[in-house]
Image (cartoon, grey):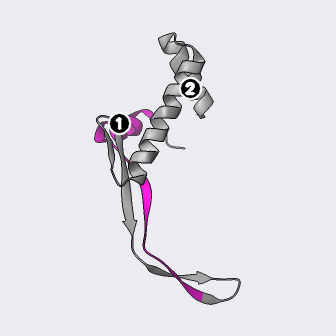
Amino acid sequence: MTKADLVAKISEKLGIEKGDVQATVETFMEEVKSSLESGDNVYLRGFGSFIIKARAEKTGRNISKNTTIKIPAHNIPAFKPAKVFVEGVKSNVEIK
């Protein structure tokens, strides 16, 4: 599902114009992004959490030059689904 598909479904279900739904979805994503960039996690009860994970420094390999490189410690955004969400996917989605 793409962002456009999501906007169309929400618009259809709620009877709101697509432009208004598009603006709402865009604003939601911007707020989540700015919150994570400022160091705050976002918790959505029953859905999941957008969190910041810290990655330690590690040694990697540049296979084209056959050398080792140091990858510095850094933070990355991550999504952790709620238990209810995980159970719903486990019980309703077929294994491919």
Kind of element beneath mark 2: helix
Q: Tell me the crowding category of disc 2: few under 14, some 14 to 19, or many 20 or more residues within 10 angstroms, Cα based.
A: some
Task: State whether residue 23 appears in this view.
Answer: yes
**How far apart in space, not on screen, are marks 2 and 1 (Cα)?**
20 Å
Amino acid type, label 2? Gln
Which residue of the protein is positioned furthest toward the bottom in this rendering? 67
Looking at the rendering, which quadrant does residue 12 occupy? top right
Q: Nearer the viewer, residue 39 or 83?
A: 39
First reached walking from the N terminus: tag 2 or tag 1: 2
Q: Which residue is mark 2?
A: 22
Q: Decide: is 68 above or below 14.
A: below
Residue denoted by label 1: 47
14 above or below 53? Answer: above
Q: Which residues are magenta?
A: 68-92
25 part of magenta stretch = no
Q: Quadrant of the N terminus?
A: top right
SS for callout 1: loop
